[in-house]
Image (spheres, rainbow, N blue to C red):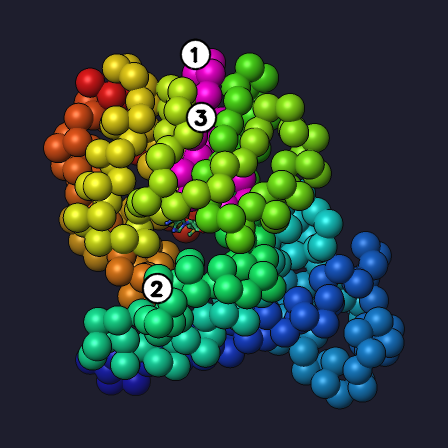
Amino acid sequence: MARTEVPRKPLEILTQGYQHFRVLATALEFRLFTLLPANGATIPEIARLVELKERPTRILAKAVAALGLIEKRGNRFRNTRLASTYLVEGRPQFYGDFIRMMDRRLYHAYERLGWALREDKPVTADPAVGDVFRTMSRDPEVTRLFTMGMDAAGRYWADCLARSLELSGTRLLLDVGGGSGVYSIALARRYRRLRAIIFDLPAVLPVTRERIHAAGLGDRVETAAGDFFADPWPPGADAVLFSSVLHDWSPETCRLLLGKAARALPAGGIVVIRESFSDDDGPGPLYAAMSSVTMLLETQGENYRWSEYELWLKETGFVGFRRIRFPTTAASGALVARRR
Ligand SMILES: C[S@@+](CC[C@H](N)C(=O)[O-])C[C@H]1O[C@@H](n2cnc3c(N)ncnc32)[C@H](O)[C@@H]1O
């Protein structure tokens, strides 16, 4: 190789990115990780478990192993720790519902990225209905797919939030656009005196109520149906949470929602913004930059920088900012501030 030759490997790996994702999503669809026994299985055994012929099973198993999700010992394949923690159905940190949601809702939307870039318009929202959330609200199955996808993505981050946020003096948390309630549920588990209200569109709340019931928190976590633009916000909160909500909207709308939060809170009340934040300088982190592309395909928003949120918080009456970066995840954290 000539000394000046540029290795092509990074580009080759990038080009296969969509294959990596589809192999992962398809292995999940075949329930490979859930069906693999703890002591592993041979290719003929896996073929029987996933109900495929041996040749496709071997190809799938090798690809999934090359991705680092299963490992081969002797002639048996078993889940790696990563897969057994996050890809086995029924495990507390099951991430598969997020992968499924990305696969079924967004994989094809990404084919229209060029259109979205040219038009500066979302592809998953029906303009005749309104924004993407109103569009999804029309179809209970899609609403469930989305809400459970967000729930699965949120479990890990909700645990990080509950570990890093001090809420022992807080009585009532208003979880604005709270979806499945995954954050309120984690916070209510950690803080035994905390009550929470999940405020979201009516179509989402049947899923939310199921999650609250499954967590056994029906006495402290409740739901309120409404439109956070048009309807009055439930009163009495001394903390407001926005998780993955502000990145759905334009800067003007973010300021409007933060202003509503300020009016809903008493002096000293807390606002928490949980997001995949963009760095103040530079383009990353990669996960936030890619999430911004998803926002282009779905919404009017993007993954804003920490400093942009701080500016909007200042303008709407908040002080005392604290940035919390969650460790061991691609990009997620919380920005906490106090009502002046
Ligand atoms: C990206 S999801 C985030 C859900 C949840 N906070 C989480 O982090 O998993 C955005 C949420 O905002 C809700 N939402 C969007 N527009 C809304 C509106 N006008 N009024 C109330 N909720 C709304 C959606 O239904 C959805 O549950």
**Label 1 Cα crowd, 10 Å radius (few <14 / some 14-19 / many 20+):** few
Observer-nearest residue: 289 or 17? 289
**Label 3 Cα crowd, 10 Å radius (few <14 / some 14-19 / many 20+):** many
Helix or strand or loop: what does disc 2 sit on? loop
The dot on residue 266 is: none
Residue at the image point whose x is 74% and y is 80% from the top: 57
Observer-nearest residue: 171 or 322? 171
Observer-nearest residue: 307 or 36? 307
> What whole-number distance in Å separates the C-alpha atoms at marks 1 and 3?
11 Å
Rendered-image quadrant of the N terminus:
bottom left
**Residue 166, placed above or below residue 53:** above
Occupied quadrant, residue 240: top left
Give amino acid for label 1. Answer: Gly
Helix or strand or loop: what does disc 3 sit on? strand
> Residue tagged by mark 1?
169
**Residue 231, placed above or below residue 50:** above
Residue at the image point whose x is 57% and y is 29% from the top: 221
> Residue tagged by mark 2?
130
Q: Position of residue 143 (x, y in %)?
A: 54, 59
Instruction: Point out the frontmost of discs 3 and 2.
Output: 2
Q: Position of residue 305 (x, y in %)?
A: 22, 46
Observer-nearest residue: 70 or 208? 208
Taking the magenta stretch, the answer to whether it contains residue 169 is yes
Occupied quadrant, residue 36: bottom right
Q: Position of residue 71 (x, y in %)?
A: 69, 63
Helix or strand or loop: what does disc 1 sit on? loop
> Residue tagged by mark 3?
173
Can residue 322 be seen in the rendering of this structure? no
The span picked out in magenta is: 157-181
Residue 318 in the figure: left or right of residue 205: left
